[in-house]
Each structure stands twice: as C-alpha cells, then as structure tokens.
Image: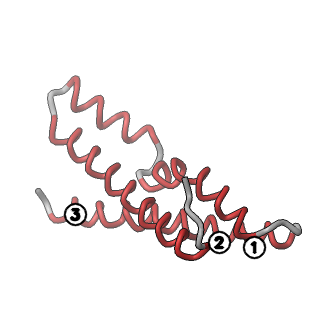
Amino acid sequence: MEERFFATIFQYYFIALGVMIGGTLIGSIGAFAAGEAPFTYINRLAKSLRIWAIVAAIGGTFDAITNFEKGLYAGSTVDMFKQIVCIIAAMGGVQTALLIIEWLIQEEIT
C-alpha cells in the first residue's frame, strides 16, 4: 500500500478523536452556562456524537458510497478495502475518545 494511505488513516483517527473530545467538552460549557450538570451532559453528548464523529472523519457519506460502488461495480476491491480500513480507523478514534471521556467524568458511557 502507498504511504499516503497510512497518513490518511491517521488523519481519520485523530479527526474522529477531536470531534468527540472537542464536541463533548465545548458542549459541556454550554450546559454549564445553561445551568445543567456538565458531566451528565457530557455523557449524553458522547452517546449522540459517535456516528457524527465517524461521518465527519471520513468526509461525509458520499465519498464512502462512491468507493463502495467502485469496489462492487468496477471490480476495484482495493478501493473498497481502503474505505473499510478508514472507517475502522475512525471508529478507533471514537473509542479512544470515549475512553478518555469516561476517565474524565468517572462514569461508564453505554
């Protein structure tokens, strides 16, 4: 595989990580300003931001669908494999962020 692909995987991982951590922490500031419990709100935000962090990391769903279409119809299974690896890397970033958030709020996110 080419070197640029590995750089893309790392970018997807850290974009998903950043969306999760940044979204929950900045969202908790808004909850604090509104008079709600910030840690409870972090828990709720972390649950709802999971899929959006993955979508933001892979650049939207249309690129993923296009790559899957290439893999199925054009017989380019390498493109389909690369897209699956990129989605798994983004999921890894989300899981890492959830672990960090759980450490921060001392509560399990289910």
The percent position of residue 28, horizontal first and vertical second, equals 72, 69
Specify which label sits upstream in the sequence, 3 or 1.
3
Secondary structure at numbered mark 1 = helix
The percent position of residue 27, horizontal first and vertical second, equals 71, 66
Tell whether label 2 touches label 3 (CB within 8 Å).
no
For badge 3, the amino acid type reads: Phe
Residue located beneath label 1 in the image? 29
The percent position of residue 10, horizontal first and vertical second, equals 31, 66
Q: Residues within 10 Å of mark 1 (few under 14, many from 20)?
A: some
Residue found farthest to the left: 1
Residue found farthest to the top: 73
Taking the spot 29% from the left edge, 29% from the top edge, the residue there is 69
Residue located beneath label 2 in the image? 25
Tell whether label 1 touches label 3 (CB within 8 Å).
no
Which of the two discs, 3 and 1, sits closer to the camera?
A: 1
Secondary structure at numbered mark 3 = helix
Tell whether label 1 touches label 2 (CB within 8 Å).
yes
Name the foreground residue: 48 vs 2: 48
